[in-house]
Amino acid sequence: MDFNDCVAFAVENPVVWLATSEGDQPHVRVLAMSFADESGFYFQIGGAKDVCHQLQKNPKVEMGFYKPDGQMGKVMRVAGKVEFLNDASLKRRVLEDRPFLKSFGLTPEHPDLVIFRIARGHAWFWTFAANLEPKRMIPFGGK
């Protein structure tokens, strides 16, 4: 498997559990990924939300994508560092893909429309059948 397999899995299963931390307290929440491609996994969040402040203080994250299949399904975990992107074209893309955000008064210029991506890190897949096998890490994004 390579990073293209990771992108395909994420695109097919865009709901993700994202783990952050605040001090010594972990926090997990569900996010819907905006999109993924060879440059990473992209997300939109609100600038006033706790998750945004947590990511600004500590950009290290882990996330889990899940595909239901049979009794246990398949999981892809991704660990990496968040990069915040202030790119008007990305913000316009998010607003086109998620028009309901406009009802909150969000525009590409609005500071509460925050885009981030995980562009570097590693991913690995888990299934029950391979539960006891060593993790096969898939690095992405270089160093």
Image (spheres, rainbow, N blue to C red):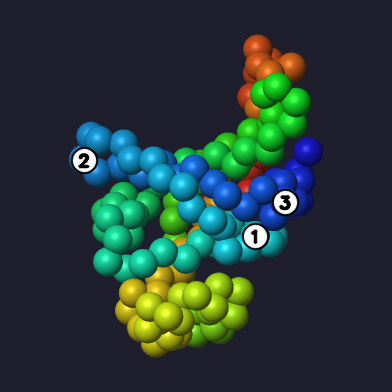
Residue at the disc numbered 2: 23
- 9 relative to 110, above or below: above
Amino acid at the residue labelled 2: Gly
Amino acid at the residue labelled 3: Glu
Marks 3,2: beta carbons within 8 A = no
Say which of 31 and 121 sits in front.
Answer: 31
Q: Residue 97 appears at what percent x and percent y? A: 61, 74
Residue at the disc numbered 1: 36
Query: Is residue 106 shown left or right of residue 12?
Result: left
Say which of 25 and 138 sits in front.
Answer: 25
Determine the secondary structure under disc 2: loop
Q: Where's the N terminus, which quadrant?
A: top right
Amino acid at the residue labelled 1: Ala
Q: Disc 1 to disc 3, how far (Cα)?
A: 10 Å
Give the residue at x 69% y 55%: 11
The answer to whether residue 125 is seen in the rendering is no
Residue at the disc numbered 3: 12
Marks 2,1: beta carbons within 8 A = no
The answer to whether residue 138 is seen in the rendering is yes
Determine the secondary structure under disc 3: helix
Give the residue at x 65% y 60%: 36
Which of pointers 3 and 2 lies earlier in the amino acid sequence?
3
Give the residue at x 66% y 27%: 126
Which of pointers 2 and 1 lies earlier in the amino acid sequence?
2
Mark identifier at residue 82: none
Write down the quadrant of residue 102 in the picture. bottom left
Write down the quadrant of residue 73 in the picture. top right
How many discs mark residues in the rendered view? 3
Q: Disc 3 to disc 2, how far (Cα)?
A: 33 Å
- 41 relative to 85, above or below: above
Mark 1 vs mark 3: give the one in front: 3
